[in-house]
Image (cartoon, coloured by chain):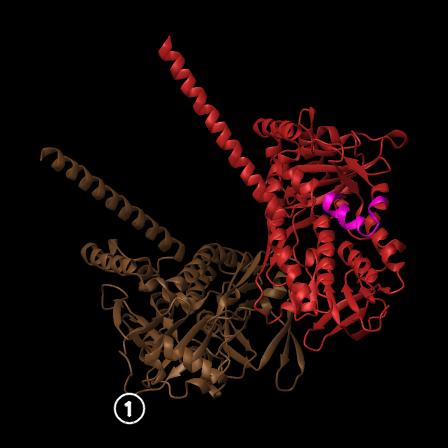
Chain colours: A red, B brown
Amino acid sequence: VSQNLPTITIIGAGLGGAALAIYLGRRGFPVEVYDLRTDLRHGTFIGPSMNLGLSRRGLMALERLGLAEGALDRAIPMRGRVVHQQDGETSFQPYGGRPEHVINAIQRRDINIALVAAADALDNVRFRFGRRCLEVDKAARTAVFRDEQTGRSENVGYDVLIGADGVFSAVRAWMQRGERADYLQEFLDWGWKELRIPAGPGGSFPFERNAFHLWPRGHSLLFAHPNLDGSFTCSFVLPFEGEPGFSSLTTNDSVLRFFSREFPDLVSLIPDLTEQFCRNPVVNLVTTRTSMWHYGGSIALLGDAAHAVVPFYAQGMNAALEDCAVLDDCIERHPGDWQGAFSEYQSLRRRHTDALAELSKRNFLELSDRVRSPFLRARRFLDIGLSRLLDDRWTTLHSRVTNTCIPYADAVEMARRQDRLLAWTGGSLALLATYGLVWLLRRS
Amino acid sequence: VSQNLPTITIIGAGLGGAALAIYLGRRGFPVEVYDLRTDLRHGTFIGPSMNLGLSRRGLMALERLGLAEGALDRAIPMRGRVVHQQDGETSFQPYGGRPEHVINAIQRRDINIALVAAADALDNVRFRFGRRCLEVDKAARTAVFRDEQTGRSENVGYDVLIGADGVFSAVRAWMQRGERADYLQEFLDWGWKELRIPAGPGGSFPFERNAFHLWPRGHSLLFAHPNLDGSFTCSFVLPFEGEPGFSSLTTNDSVLRFFSREFPDLVSLIPDLTEQFCRNPVVNLVTTRTSMWHYGGSIALLGDAAHAVVPFYAQGMNAALEDCAVLDDCIERHPGDWQGAFSEYQSLRRRHTDALAELSKRNFLELSDRVRSPFLRARRFLDIGLSRLLDDRWTTLHSRVTNTCIPYADAVEMARRQDRLLAWTGGSLALLATYGLVWLLRRS
């Protein structure tokens, strides 16, 4: 480790923070990672979390660290969606035309532990768990941390501070204080609750293992990821208020009645449904956006701290890991010039993560309702047919987001162009057909 | 004062907080008003502030307190805009078709002192100046205030807490902590700086006294309100970055050169222009919006704390005073039911203050640039002609916002309908003319 390199202080040992610690540790920087939780390798509960979907972008960022294979060992590839109708009928929608077009179901805990362990294995990376960031003085370049065990606070100077501390980032709040920073936080009127389908007899899977399972009901939504032990982790998504709504599902009776009506196939598979329902909290769904990702060449934000999205495109983790790879590139291109590196990082990323925020909100509608539409299912088969025929020149938006590293906003633009082309072609064919018909009628 | 009425604790003795103290004091509630500044009746500097424009809505709210006449005594009615072109040419655009269609220029200090004095004259209203709200515990219904002189903190219980503490409201932040509250803050890339044109010889006015003066330059904007002493208070509005921009006007030379080119008529009228320019800070322009104005029948927000707007429609103060009148009505309609009163207050107000936020942003474009367009000037004269002809059935949007108490969103909707009618009429007339022409051509 060179004596001349500044120390990088990272707040947050989640996926983004731990991954960046590896990236920058490998560049030789001394790295200190603070996290308010205790070390999750020692069994810390890290809160409810949808099983995560690791796709191309996240894998690419892990590959650069040599960690992709290890992650895939702990993951289950999902080849598409199985849609479960109310009457028990199921249909399969593949994620793409090729075998590598999969989303990998992985537990947040597993991948987080792998990243923390890989970072901790580097000599120049040090973790300081159980320390909450209370305050950042951006002018003095100091931060106050409270030891959550002793209650004692400590004032620590920093050279470069990275806020990887999640959607309600303390670093962001302190950095933006008094600054001209646009900020939006926007909640869905829906929340979600984790439920668990236990493994079948002898660790068997109660459903098709290599798929994402979806129960779209319009006014509610349930989806499930497979786990290695044969169980499935479900996310049950419902409005807070109204009928149905979490506010009206308050008794065992009402919960059972609701599930028997909407998800009859699940009731027998989750014997302790009502207990789980009572025990597990309802979690908010929030999108945030901000115009100020960095400050004075000394602070930058990463992942949810810069751009939280709702989880319906399964891209939150992938975007955070991609942030690390892009930031690492920018630091390489601007040696010693942190202001330049952070500026380029924000200008490369922000427009794409803003696009992802929109995509993720839109996909909520698709998953909860539109996925059932026969028109959309026909379109999906048309797209897959065209993509097999035209190879990579024709790809769905979902596939570009999931199976490629094309920046999000560019993927959206390509999809827009494809839709226009399809509309033109369709329109032209319809016109031709009409002319043909008129010509035929005249001849007869 | 009845022993059974809860105490109302108001944070912020600005325009909204002081006016609400009078409204609720007159209803018999014990009222305590905390403000972090010292009493501005003793000469406290209250920061740069555009001279305010008091129009119908604000006047209506003051009339209900018997304070409108007193306010008008300290105000100068402005009958319209005088637009100053770069070559010195001026043109006048009236605010409406009637003598009472004016905006009253008034100093923030004057109206704030009048409101505080009127509140303080009530036996059951008490002011506690120099106390900063550090923390609100909404579950325990307590707030921590720090005495800014002694530095000592005090924990105070409250029954009902009103956050009238401005755009970066501490009450809002504490109330929304952990809640599902949407929040947007959005800055313009422009800032503004106060400048002062001194009175002419013997307290005479250097310009037409009863008008709002405007120097629209597209890439910059300056406007001025008359003061009672013959001086004018100017707001100079400019982008932060770029050319021209505040970041490039850093030397006396560059300031003088810029003003000589863009506002040659002002250079001789402000002898200490460069001193003023160096001394006065650049102030941000921010819009905020939030979905959560109240909590648990014990906290509500008012004025900028709930909805800050950019000042280009001169409606910030008027909207805050209108908030007080609406909240007072709601409290009257729901005696003892604060949850009900606050819910109705938000549902009556929010959509209109959201509409005002959009109007205020749009009017920035009009003032800085479009006001010069010959088309818009023609349209303004057409509107004024139609409004004279059709009386109140035809009114401009600006006039509905300024000269009436029609809720903002309704005023916008009426303007939209009027525009459609005009487009239809114009379109029909054009069609008729074309048919007429064709008919004539055929005959000849």
Above-or-below relation of A265 to B63: above
| Position of residue A150 in the picture relative to residue A293 (left or right) | right
Q: Label 1 sits on what residue type?
A: Pro
Residue A68 located within the stretch drawn in magenta: yes
Q: Position of residue B404 (x, y in %)?
A: 32, 61
Residue A443 found in image quarter: top left
Q: Which residues are magenta?
A: A53-69
Q: Is residue B331 above or below residue B16?
A: above
Please tell me which residue is depicted at 85% across the width and 42% down the height of the picture.
A74
Q: Nearer the viewer, residue B129 or B373?
A: B373
Residue at x 71%, y 37% (from the top left corner): A223
Q: Quadrant of the C terminus of chain B?
A: top left
Residue B321 visible in the current orientation? no
Residue linked to disc 1: B201
User: Which residue is pictured at 63% across the width and 30% down the height?
Assistant: A390
Decide which of B298, A291 is in the foreground and name it.
A291
Q: Position of residue A14 (x, y in %)?
A: 78, 56
Q: Is residue A94 magenta?
A: no
Q: Chain of mark 1?
A: B
Displayed quadrant of residue A232? top right
Check disc 1: other Cα within 10 Å, few if <14, some if 14-19, many if 20+: few
**Image quarter of residue B314:** bottom left
Badge 1 marks a residue whose secondary structure is: helix
Which residue lies most toward the bottom here? B202
Q: Position of residue B101 (x, y in %)?
A: 27, 67
Would you say residue B7 is visible in this rendering? Answer: yes
Front in this rendered view, residue B416 or B26:
B416
